[in-house]
Every structure is written in structure tokens, then in C-alpha cells.
Image (spheres, rainbow, N blue to C red):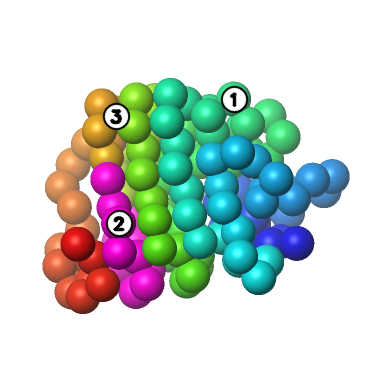
Amino acid sequence: MASTDCAALSGGIETLDEDCCDHPAILCSGGRIVQIIDEDNQLQGYVTKFLIFHSHFPSDIGNLTELVTFKLINSDIKGELPSSMAKLTRLNHFELRNTRVNGTLPSEMGDMIALN
């Protein structure tokens, strides 16, 4: 169970009854979240169970240190990307398309050498 990673997605609120790794938009390996691919608001519908994203980016997302893929496509998740994204040093695929994300990319993301 990826309770630490699930808590990072839920703003520090532990999930009580399910593992966020069971969500179809989230892939885990060894109990850690390694991939988030939200196409067409799959995570939005999951908010009631996990409080994931609360329609915006959680500031603790940088604690997902094993995350390698992050994609939001046709998503209503909004707001600015937190600077903690720069802690995702294994992230090698980052994609935002047709989202409500605003602002600029955190300058710290420029130092992410694995990102392509």
C-alpha cells in the first residue's frame, strides 16, 4: 500500500478505506506511485474517495519521489504548479494538454535533468 504517496496526493489526509494505487489513473510499483496519467478527468471523479488534488495541485506532490510520468490531458485540475515539483528528480515525462493549469512552470523545474 502506498499510504505515504497517497497522503501526498490528498494534501496529507490519509486514505482510510482504499489504496490510491487501485485508481486506474495511478500506477504503483513497490508500493510507490510511479505514474499519474489523468485523461478526461479520471482523478476528478475520485476526489470523493481520496480527496486527490482537490481540483488543484497539492503542495506535497514533490514527495512522490518515484514518480516518472505525469500527464494531465483534458483535465479540469487548475492552479499553478507548486515549486515542490522540482523534487521529482526521476520524472522523465511531463505533459499538460487542454487543462486549466495557469501561471508559469516553476523555475526549479529547469534543473530536472531526467525530464524530456
Q: Which residue is found at the position 74% from the left and 50% from the top?
A: 19
In the figure, residue 97 lies in which quadrant?
A: top left
Q: Which residue is found at the position 44% from the left and 42% from the top?
A: 37
Q: Is residue 18 left or right of residue 31?
A: right
In the displayed structure, 44 sits above or below 71; it is above
In the displayed structure, 50 sits above or below 41; it is below
Front residue of this view, candidates 113 and 51: 113
Q: Residues within 10 Å of mark 1 (few under 14, many from 20)?
A: few
Kind of residue at disc 1: Gly
Kind of residue at disc 3: Thr
Residue 50 lies, in percent from the top left, at 68, 40
Residue 17 lies, in percent from the top left, at 84, 45
CA gap, disc 3 and disc 1:
16 Å
Q: Is residue 94 magenta?
A: yes
Q: Earlier in the sequence, mark 2 or mark 3?
A: 2
Disc 3: which residue? 99
Q: Which mark is residue 53?
A: none
In the displayed orientation, state which residue is furthest to the right.
Answer: 17
The span picked out in magenta is 82-95
Disc 2: which residue? 93
Front residue of this view, candidates 31 and 9: 31
Residue 73 lies, in percent from the top left, at 34, 32
Q: Which residue is found at the position 30% from the left and 56% from the top?
A: 93
Q: Earlier in the sequence, mark 3 or mark 1?
A: 1
Q: Earlier in the sequence, mark 2 or mark 1?
A: 1
Q: Residues within 10 Å of mark 3 (few under 14, many from 20)?
A: some
